[in-house]
Image: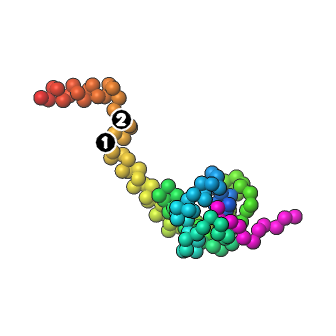
Amino acid sequence: MKQPPATMRLDKWLWAARFFKTRGLAQKQIELNRVSVNGAKAKTSKYITVGDVIDLTLNSLPYKLTVLALNEQRRPAPEARLLYQEDEATAQNREAQKLLDQASRITAAYPDGRPTKRDRRQLDKMKRDSW
């Protein structure tokens, strides 16, 4: 029986843990310095081990993960969640930031998108009548 690896490339682990759909996307985020390991900038070829702490910014949202296991294959999401443990404070901070983003979208000028032709006609009519 094959034993799990002792070390693994960072980009491959991020792909196996389902943070990115492809290894290429993981490599790009690492090159853009959106991923750090144990507080230091990481390169794509960085090897990680169990116990390393990974700081990740994904879609402008922070993640702080502790590596619990290494897996060479990409498995289903419930199994992928067993590869890491997330920091509770960072998770709460991320959820609060998501709520703020949603609230800011609601207060936008057109929350449902651009006005339709019918909406524009009604606006024009209201403007003409008020003059």
Can you give x and y, in whole percent of width and height, for residue 45 in the image? 65, 66
**Above-or-below relation of 112 to 13:** above
Q: Residue at x 39, y 55 (%)?
A: 100
Q: Residue at x 18, y 29 (%)?
A: 127
Residue 2 in the magenta stretch? The answer is yes
- Label 1 vs label 2: CA separation? 9 Å
For disc 1, the neighbor class at 10 Å (few under 14, some 14 to 19, many from 20) is few
Q: Secondary structure at mark 2?
A: loop
Residue 85 is drawn in which quadrant? Answer: bottom right
Span shown in magenta: 1-11
For disc 2, the neighbor class at 10 Å (few under 14, some 14 to 19, many from 20) is few
Q: Do we see residue 104 in this rendering?
A: yes
Residue located beneath label 2 in the image: 114
The amino acid marked with disc number 2 is Arg
Return the residue found at the far right. 1
Q: Residue at x 55, y 59 (%)?
A: 29
Residue located beneath label 1 in the image: 109
Q: How many marks?
A: 2
The amino acid marked with disc number 1 is Ala
